[in-house]
Image (tube, rainbow, N blue to C red):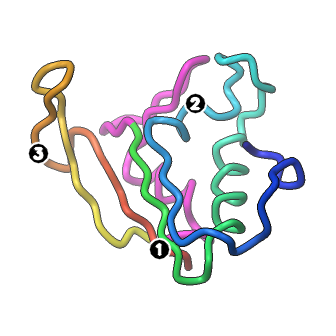
Amino acid sequence: MTKRDSLPFNDRTFDYIISLSTLEHIGLGYYGGDLNRRGDRMAVEVIHSLLKPDGKFLVTLPFSGKYTENSFQRIHTKESFQTLISGYFRIEKQQFWIPKSKKNWIAASEEEVGVCCLSRV
């Protein structure tokens, strides 16, 4: 995902790009990909290049009061997520959710889990 020239799409092709529980894993090598600690930032750059100027990027990812990174995933804070998207996207709308059960999620506060819809900068 992080190598722009390997994708079969032209720049500014998409109105929307959706990343569901994916961005936090890119570049960590857990799923057999290359280890690159900037993999998530590189993915954001690629996503930005693929979106039309008024395109939207919908992203879900783990969110917490403390940034955590291991070989499986990154758990972002408000600040670390803002750093990740800076220069490429601005937060347009946020919704926060927590799991009530494995298949049922309920609305929550910002201190818990985040879902963000972003606009290009």
Q: Secondary structure at mark 3?
A: strand
67 or 9, which is in the foreground? 9
The residue lying at 64 percent from left, 43 percent from top is 40
Kind of residue at badge 3 = Ala
Q: Indicate left or right for 76 with 85 as reference.
A: left
The quarter of the image holding the C terminus is bottom right
87 drawn magenta: yes
The span shown in magenta is 62-89
Q: Amino acid at mark 2?
A: His
Considering depth in this image, is 79 or 91 the residue closer to the camera? 91
Q: Amino acid at mark 1?
A: Ser
Q: Which residue is mark 1?
A: 119
Secondary structure category for the residue under label 2: helix
Q: Which residue is mark 3?
A: 107
Mark 2 → mark 1, Cα distance in angstroms? 22 Å
- Please name the residue that numbered disc 2 is placed on: 25
Q: Is residue 49 left or right of residue 16?
A: right
Q: Residue at x 47, y 28 (%)?
A: 68
Examine the image and state in which quarter residue 120 appears: bottom right
Which of marks 2 and 3 precedes in the sequence?
A: 2
On whether residue 20 falls in the magenta region, the answer is no
Query: Residue at the location (39% across, 45% down)?
Result: 60
Secondary-structure class at tag 1? strand
